[in-house]
Image (cartoon, rainbow, N blue to C red):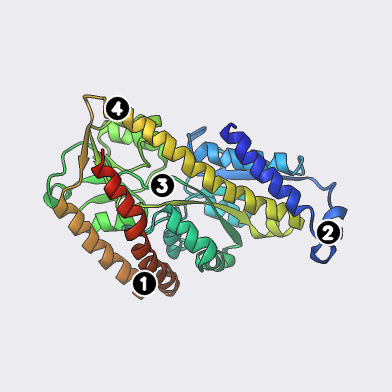
């Protein structure tokens, strides 16, 4: 079965279930609205047709239209086509578009605590994030945080653990970080800033040219799959790991609250289920794509795959603790989310240590 058929099947089945509500849960109102057609716009933060991120947003729209039998049609706009790539929060909040797909850490300066819902340096991986969001307080807190901004958020995809980034010079010690100019968003960007790096935020479509021309000295983007699609391996020599700053980044689908409330219950359910299906699909795509692309990169004699030195990782870990302590002390929303996040991480870390980590460690010994 092809991937797109699998995801469509999941959403179609979910849509059928959503339409089969009992009378007590609203079957009559759902049935009476079966002929209504809704036409929405989705704005995204991604370059056109970008594998994984951009195509994932398009697939959400496609599956919703198909599963709704055309009752909810969503036209997707790449970053910059309707609104700037990093301004989808305001566009969806204000009703320029009914839906958006991006990453919550791009909203720093608008709603700073939203950064927790993309990723936390040295924090949870994607599976842990999904556990916290769906079975802990994560999604509840996320929706409470966005409610004053007229938005309903949904988790809608993950790249899995990312790479540390592309550098035009070697990083052999903490001294080599100082004076670098690097594209890095979110909490990880603040950590790098305190390490002596000048951090900048730019959309994906600008990264290659900026790195190639020397406007920046380094960049993180995603991982081998997407980095190769942007050509970053042609603009820098040193490829560093691990992605300490983005261990399990979650993408978001945000929906304008009035637009969401205007939908019948079955279409509301369909949006939620389509986003949940994309969580599974996108993570599988990146696991596959990163493996294929890394195999190609390691055969390129012009690329050097490097692990960050221990003193660099120790510094970044210490600075992360400092950043998070200050952030949660000065922002009441950050404090509330921080406590929920790290209460679960403390429990999950023990479980991961004797399960995933122990298994991967011993698997590596057998190679």
Tag of residue 160: 3
> Is residue 277 shown left or right of residue 110?
right
Callout 4 crowding tier (Cα within 10 Å): few <14, some 14–19, many ≥20? some
Name which of mark 4 and mark 3 comes first in the sequence: 3
Name which of mark 1 and mark 2 comes first in the sequence: 2
Q: How many marks?
A: 4
Q: Say which quadrant the N terminus sits in.
A: top right
In x, y percent, where is residue 141?
52, 68
> Is residue 134 shown left or right of residue 294?
right
Name which of mark 1 and mark 4 comes first in the sequence: 4
In x, y percent, where is residue 109?
42, 60
Q: Tell me the residue at 25%/55% (across/down).
A: 193
**CB atoms of marks 3 and 2 within 8 Å:** no
Q: CA distance from mark 4 to mark 3?
A: 23 Å
The residue furthest front is 366
Q: Nearer the viewer, mark 4 or mark 3?
A: 3
**CB atoms of marks 1 and 3 within 8 Å:** no
On the image, which quarter does residue 292 sit in?
Answer: top left
Callout 1 crowding tier (Cα within 10 Å): few <14, some 14–19, many ≥20? some
The residue labelled by disc 1 is: 328
Q: CA distance from mark 3 to mark 2?
A: 39 Å
Q: Tell me the residue at 57%/44% (across/down).
A: 43
183 to 23, vertically: above or below: above
349 to 168, vertically: above or below: below
Tag of residue 234: 4
Q: CA distance from mark 2 to mark 4?
A: 56 Å
The residue labelled by disc 2 is: 27
């Amino acid at each position: 079965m092809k991937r797109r058929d699998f995801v469509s099947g999941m959403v179609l089945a979910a849509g059928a279930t959503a339409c089969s509500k009992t009378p007590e849960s609203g079957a009559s109102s759902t049935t009476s609205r079966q002929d209504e057609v809704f036409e929405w716009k989705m704005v995204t933060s991604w370059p056109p047709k970008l594998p994984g991120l951009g195509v994932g947003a398009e697939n959400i729209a496609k599956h919703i239209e198909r599963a709704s039998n055309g009752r909810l049609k969503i036209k997707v706009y790449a970053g910059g086509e309707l609104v700037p790539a990093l301004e989808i929060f305001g566009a969806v909040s204000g009703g320029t578009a009914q839906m958006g797909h991006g990453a919550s850490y791009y909203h720093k300066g608008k709603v700073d605590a939203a950064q927790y819902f993309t990723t936390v340096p040295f924090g949870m991986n994607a599976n842990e994030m999904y556990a916290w969001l769906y079975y802990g307080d994560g999604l509840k807190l996320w929706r409470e945080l966005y409610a004053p901004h007229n938005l309903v958020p949904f988790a809608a995809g993950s790249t899995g653990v990312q790479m540390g980034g592309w550098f035009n010079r070697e990083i052999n010690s903490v001294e080599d970080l100082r004076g670098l100019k690097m594209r890095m968003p979110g909490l990880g960007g603040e950590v790098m800033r305190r390490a002596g790096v000048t951090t900048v935020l730019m959309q994906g479509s600008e990264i290659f040219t900026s790195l190639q021309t020397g406007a920046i000295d380094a960049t993180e983007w995603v991982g081998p799959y997407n980095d190769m699609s942007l050509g970053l391996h042609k603009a820098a020599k040193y490829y560093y790991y691990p992605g300490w700053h983005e261990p399990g980044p979650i993408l978001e689908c945000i929906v304008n609250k009035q637009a969401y409330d205007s939908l019948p219950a079955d279409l509301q359910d369909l949006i939620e289920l389509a986003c949940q299906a994309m969580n599974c699909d996108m993570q599988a795509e990146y696991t596959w794509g990163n493996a294929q692309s890394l195999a190609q990169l390691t055969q390129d004699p012009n690329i050097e795959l490097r692990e960050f030195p221990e003193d660099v990782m120790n510094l970044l870990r210490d600075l992360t603790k400092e950043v998070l302590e200050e952030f949660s002390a000065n922002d009441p929303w950050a404090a509330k989310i921080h406590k929920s996040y790290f209460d679960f991480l403390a429990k999950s870390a023990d479980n991961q240590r004797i399960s995933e980590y122990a298994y991967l460690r011993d698997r590596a010994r057998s190679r």
